[in-house]
Every structure is written in structure tokens, then in C-alpha cells.
Image (cartoon, rainbow, N blue to C red):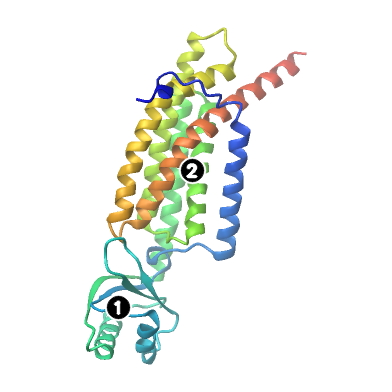
Amino acid sequence: MPQFFLKPKFDFISARWTFLTISIVIILAGIVTLAIRGPNYSIDFRGGLDIHLRFEKPITEGEVRSALSPLDLGVAEVKRVHALGEPDEILIRIKQSEVSSDLITRIESTLAEAFLDNPFDVRNVDAVGPKVGRELRRQAIISALVALVLLMIYISWRFEFKFAVGSVVALLHDVLITLGFFAFFNYEISLQVVAAFLTLIGYSLNDTIVVYDRIRENMNKLRTKSLAEIVNDSINQTLARTVITSVTLFVVVLVLFLFAGQVVRGFAFAMLIGVITGTYSSIFVAAPVVLEWAQRTAVKGKKKRR
């Protein structure tokens, strides 16, 4: 292990406002981007039809679009999907209130007739009704909110309420920044991505609890030090474990993102951003929130006594 991880002496607390400002800027930029573009929901949440095709020979989106024009598909989108180490695929996305097997058959037969010298494989077909999409979106939001409330109750019971507030602020920070990067790169928000968000909540919380546990332990041992010094020492003492765990997970998720294909790309991208933000928030968000809460409470207590 590098020497600076054995007994680190970084002054994280003094730099907390700088890093919190960076986080706020990224979050605001993500919110503005989402407001301008709108969420890029996958078929899971918006309903409609997605067909992934892989042609034997290179083909352009315009050629596929022209071949489908006689079908009058309404709001339809044709785009190329890139996957590292694999041939490109063509994604046909149709937003219709009702999707039937007959429509899928007509699309496939029309393309087969239009490109007799360029056969294709149907890689994947997803069809979801709009009512089902709305219901899945509602359930995803409820699941995330219930998870946050239960976690807040658990941390309040295990530690103190101010620790619970710090952890929830850190989790919201992680989710908002990850959503921001989805908006920047226009990645789809699917059920897999929601699963990644819930996974990140658990990962980030685990990292935060490790720091919290060390803070509570040091508060009992280092009574001569100020709370700011105790928090800073606790972060440094858990830094090696945090970095090793995060780097290990990051490498695994990076390989998944690069080579696992289009199906899990959104999940892997959310995990990549989340691993970084989860580690970052444990140091620069969760612990500083606890410190600020305690310091402000102490100041208010002194004013009341006066």
C-alpha cells in the first residue's frame, strides 16, 4: 500500500466548502440540462416499442428510415447503437399507444424486402404499454423514497438524528449527480438504472457508516480534541479502506461498462459515476453535514443559556 495511505494527514474539513461548491455546481448544471432536454426515459417508463437489429453489412440510419416510411409509424426514431468490440446495431424506437405483434412482423418483413442483399438479425424486441410505463415510473420513485426513509430511521436509531440527516443528504447528492451525468451524456433511464441507483444507495451508505462509526468511537476516545479534528482524523483513519474498496469496485464496473454490451450499459454507467460520488460524499458531504449540525446546535445552545 502506498505510504500516504498508511497514516494520511489530509485536511479534508478545511476544504469541505470548496468541494461542496463543486457538487452544487454539478447538481445545478444537471437540473438545468434535465429541464431543457427532459428525462430520457427508456421504454420501461414511457411505453412503446424498441427493436434492435444487427445487419451483416454497414447501413445508415437514413436507409432504414426510408425503408420504413411506407408503414406510417408515427413518432419513430432510428439511430445507431455503439458497443465496444461489437458491430453496430440499429435501434428502431416507436412511440405508440398500442403495440401489437402484427406491427413487429410488418416492420421485419418490410426491412427484409428492402434489404434483400443485407440480411439482419433481430437482437432484441421490447414492447411496453404506456399505462404500464407510468405505473413502473411511479413504483420506482416510491421505492427510492421508502428506501431513504427507512435508512434515515435506521441510522437515527444506531447513531443520532444528525448522522441520519448527513447520510440522507449524501445519498441525495449521489443520486442527483448521477442523474446529472445521465442528462449530460443523454443516457436512458431504465429499470436497470433504477436498480443501479438503489444499489448505489446501499454502497454509499455502507461507506458512510464506516466513517460514522469511527467518528463515534473517536468522540469517546479523543475528548481533548475539537469535533472538527475528530471528524478529520476519522476520515483519514478510514481512508485506506475506502479507497481500496472503491478502486476495486470501480475496475470491475469499468470492465462491465466497456465489454458487457448495450443491454447493461446504463446500469454500468450509473455504477461508475455512483462509486466515485459515493466515496466522495462520505468524505466531503456526510461527515461535514454532521459537523455543521453539531456546531450550529452548540452555538444555539450557548445563546439560549445566555
For the point 45% across and 30% down, which residue is it? 208
Residue 302, numbered circle: none
Residue identifier under label 2: 174
Measured as percent of width and height from the top left, residue 156 is found at 48, 27
Could you classify mark 1 by the number of other residues whose Cα lies within 10 Å: few (under 14), some (14-19), or many (20 or more)?
few
What amino acid is labelled 1 in the image? Answer: Pro
Residue identifier under label 1: 58
Residue 118 visible in the picture: yes
Residue 94 sits above or below residue 218 on the image: below
User: Which corner quadrant of the image does residue 109 belong to?
Assistant: bottom left
Image depth: mark 2 or mark 1 in front: 1
* In the image: residue 118, left or right of residue 60: left
- Residue toward you, 44 or 286: 286
Residue 159 visible in the picture: no
Cα separation between marks 2 and 1: 40 Å
Q: Secondary structure at mark 2?
A: helix
Measured as percent of width and height from the top left, residue 102 is found at 27, 84
* In the image: residue 231, left or right of residue 52: right
Measured as percent of width and height from the top left, residue 134 is found at 43, 64
Residue 143 sits above or below residue 4 on the image: below
* In the image: residue 40, left or right of residue 50: right
**The C terminus appears in which quarter of the rendering?**
top right
For the point 38% across and 79% down, which residue is it? 61
**The N terminus appears in which quarter of the rendering?**
top left
Q: Secondary structure at mark 1?
A: loop
